[in-house]
Every structure is written in C-alpha cells, then in structure tokens.
Amino acid sequence: MGQQQGSRIEFGDCRETMRRWAAEGVKAQMCVTSPPYYGLRNYGHDGQIGLEQTPEQYIAAMVEVFRCVWDVLADDGTLWLNIGDSYAGAGYSNNKNTGGAARVDGGKQRHLSGTGCKNKDLIGIPWMLAFSLRADGWYLRQEIIWHKPNPMPESVRDRCTKAHEQIFLLTKQPRYYFDNEAIKTPVKQDCGTRDRQDGKCHNEGTGLQPHSGLEKSYEMANKRSVWTVPTRPYKGAHFATFPAELIEPCILAGSRAGDVVLDPFMGSGTTAGVALKHGRQYLGCELNPEYGRLQAERIASLSAQQVKELGSHQIEKPAANDPQINQHALF
C-alpha cells in the first residue's frame, strides 16, 4: 500500500498536495468525494475549482484533479464521485457584448458558449465529467442515484423540482476491491401461504420457488443503485455538507478496516469522521484553512463512539489562537 503516515488533512491546492503524496509513495485504498459544483458558489479563494469561465474548463480542471487521485489510489481501489448539475442561464444575465449568456460574478462575466447550450438548458455536468474520466483511462462502473427526500426548494414552474444527484463509481482496473456483503440491505419478503400437506410456503405471484418452513428463503440482497438519503445541515459548514449516511456505504464497500480513505475536497470533514468511525484512516485536502476547526469538531462528533471504544485514536483540535493550522493528524 506504499508509505503510511497516519490520518491527516492538509490545506492548499489538492493537486499540488496529491502530487507530493504520490512522490512520497503515499497510497489510499479508495477515494470518496464531492467536488465544488460548477458555477454554484464562490468560496472566496483564488484558484478555486467551480468558477471557471466555461463548463469545458471546469471539466478539464476536474480531470486533472482525478489524474492526481489516480496516482495516489491503490491499483485495486475505487473512486466514488458525487457531482451535481447546473442549468445554462441560472444566475446568468444576457449580455449583447459577449454574444450570449454570461455569469456575473464579482464583476467578472463568464461564458457558456463552448457547450453549445442554450439559455435554460441542463448542461449535463455529471455525464460530461464521467465520460471525460472514462476517456482518460478510468473504468466507469456504475451510476448511483442519490435520491433526496427533502430537496432544496426551487422557484420553478416549467419543470419538476430536482431531487437527485449522481454518484459515479470508477476504478483503475476491471477487477477491484468491492465488498458487496458489507452493504447488503434487508429484504422484506412475504413467505405467502403454507400448504398444510407438504409443509412448504408458496410465494404466489412472485415467481419464486416454494421453500420449506415459514422462514424467508433469503434475508439480505445486493444494495440497489438508488440511495435515499436526506440532506442534513451542519452548523458552521458551507451549505453543501456531504451527508454521512451517503458516505458510509461507499467506505464500507470500498475499503477494509485499517485502509486509507482519500477525499481531495474534505470541506467540513465528514468523510474523515465516517472513515474513523468505521476503523479506517483518512487523507484529506482542503483549499480553505478556515475549515480546520470545523473539521476537527466534525470528525470528533462523528467518530466519538469509535474513538472511545478503541482508545488509541486522539483528535488534535487546532488551538484557539492558531488560525493558520495546515494539518491535523490522528494516530
């Protein structure tokens, strides 16, 4: 697995950080992440991903990020990528001097002309990225639908309110580590009627073969590709907090206890907390150093029970007078 240095989060451009890790021989078994979405939010940092002039520039930047992930990821590792979509013209204004729709952001106008999108078109960012990563060498193994039962309200009258996002499962090889047993889900099955003569249950109308006794013939099934997980706000975090319940099946299926979980867009630290909760290590990158204290609190809140049980993990919180902390470590 290469060099092991314990769990940590480092601040700065994730591409530079991961290139250094790759040179040092650092490896992660899996990556689960939710990058900044295109054109959605300005976090106030120069060089942040998501404020590119065109969707194509955004996709190019993301492909570069995941080339760096490739170099850190184990050969049999997996990448779980959550990405949202955008509409052409959403938050944009028409400007006759630019020849089309342009976003006004801090006085700077950005164009959508390269996509061929018309105003109000769904850009298709998730599939643009998925196909670009596939063309760059990744195996595109699956699309998972994150169904949100409590979606963000939208003031639209000419389409349905969007209540889902994509999670893509990508790999470096056709064969890779995937523990489907760890994420199997209970199956509610009616055993039907019991024949008094042969003592077997007949599942009428199900197409299943009769089986003996009143017990179900199977109790667990392979996890389906639609995951219903509500969004959950976290005080102090940016609005797009990655739900812990969405990350858990990715980590359980994609890693073993003790493995390293990578998130190049660590944000509020949810991935790190879930990883630690399930006995994994973590590696994280984050552009905004102001998230340091929030990450330490988030990690502690998600992993407190596991930390208490194991007794060997200790969260190092940033000092109250140290806003420039560049990493915090466990183990």
Image (cartoon, rainbow, N blue to C red):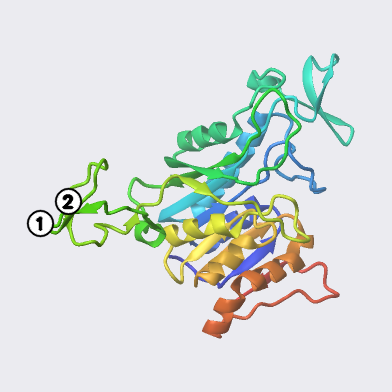
The answer to whether 195 appears left or right of 90 in the picture is left
The label nearer to you, 2 versus 1, is 1
Q: Which residue is mark 2?
A: 210
The answer to whether 112 appears left or right of 208 in the picture is right
The answer to whether 216 appears left or right of 11 in the picture is left
**Residue under the point 67% across and 41% down:** 37
Q: Inspect this view and state whether residue 26 appears.
A: no
Q: Secondary structure beneath disc 1? A: loop
Instruction: Tell me how far mark 2 sits from mark 1, CA to CA.
Output: 10 Å
Place residue 292 in its image quadrant: bottom right
Query: Where does the image place residue 323, in percent across and percent down from the top left?
Result: 83, 68
Identify residue type, mark 1.
Asp
Query: Where does the image place residue 278, in percent across and percent down from the top left?
Result: 50, 70
Above or below residue 89? Residue 21 is below
Above or below residue 250? Residue 50 is above
Q: Which residue is mark 1?
A: 198
Mark 2 touching mark 1, by CB under 8 A? yes
